[in-house]
Image (cartoon, rainbow, N blue to C red):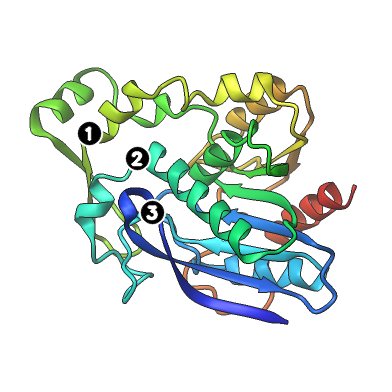
Amino acid sequence: MKQVKNAIYFGADNKSSLFDISIPNQWNNKLIVFIHGYMGYKDWGCWGLVENYFNKKKYGLLKYNVSHNGGTIDNPIDFDDLNSFSHNNYLKELQDFEAITNIIQSEFKELPELYIIGHSRGGGIALLQSENIFISKIVSWSGICSIADRFPKGDALKEWKNNGYYYRENGRTKQKMPHSYTQYEIFISHKNRLNIESYCRKSTTPTLIVHGDKDVSVSINEGEILAEWLNTSLTRIKGAQHTFGASQPWKSSELPSYLHEACEATLNFFDD
């Protein structure tokens, strides 16, 4: 196994962040890029076990922290850099993904076949890669179907504009996570590039939608909508919530059954 942990890359605004890459000895020359979700990071919960699962199936895997997720090089798990978090946006995360693909192109003499798994918000970023010529297959785990719907509406939007910030509590750290109004302004300025529906309806990239039917963070209705736009079937994980039974911290050496089911469905799709 060839493995690099906490390597540095430079993402949006040339901000440094971290990535891991693992290549099994009997590699099939297929590399999965894993994109975490909102308030997430590459080392959350079971993502390391997901990496191990696919390594054992001969797949390489690269997972990374988006550059403005609030983590730092010295502390990538907690959110020491709330200023960066407050100015993160979906366009920056697309730029981070481009930076990661540039690293892959520079590190491999022969470009491997590239697949994506995106979780939650990361699922949206993955789906927005449907026109990326380097990507062979896309998988959305509990993915969002609309970026516009992630923002406050009505009076709450007006209040956000007037105050400049709104806050959401992080359930793990109990921090009040700031969101600058510039996030919304960037979305409005780039709403065509950030239109998941448009990219799904035009997509010719094979795509799998996986969603738990007990997800209260991103409703399975969003998975159904994505599947309809893509003219594909939805893989339902019965009984699963947003993270397929995983949590942070995760002390077991085994995947939760729901997440294992999601991995198996994904593997079957990648192997097909």
Q: Which residue type carries mark 1?
A: Thr
Comparing marks 3 and 2, which lies closer to the viewer? 2
Nearest to N terminus: mark 3 or mark 2: 3
Q: Position of residue 18 (x, y in %)?
A: 44, 67
Left or right: residue 155 versus residue 268 is: left
Distance from label 1 to label 2 (Cα)?
Answer: 8 Å
Q: Which residue type carries mark 2?
A: Asn
Q: Position of residue 61 (x, y in %)?
A: 67, 64
Distance from label 3 to label 2 (Cα)?
Answer: 12 Å
Q: Residue furthest front?
A: 109
In the image, 70 versus 209, the foreground residue is 70
Q: Is residue 109 above or below residue 12?
A: below
Question: Which residue is the site of mark 3?
Answer: 39
Q: Position of residue 201 (x, y in %)?
A: 66, 19
Question: Which residue is the site of mark 2?
Answer: 89
Question: Which residue is the site of mark 1?
Answer: 182
Q: Are marks 1 and 2 in contact (CB under 8 Å)?
A: yes
| Residue 147, image quadrant | top left
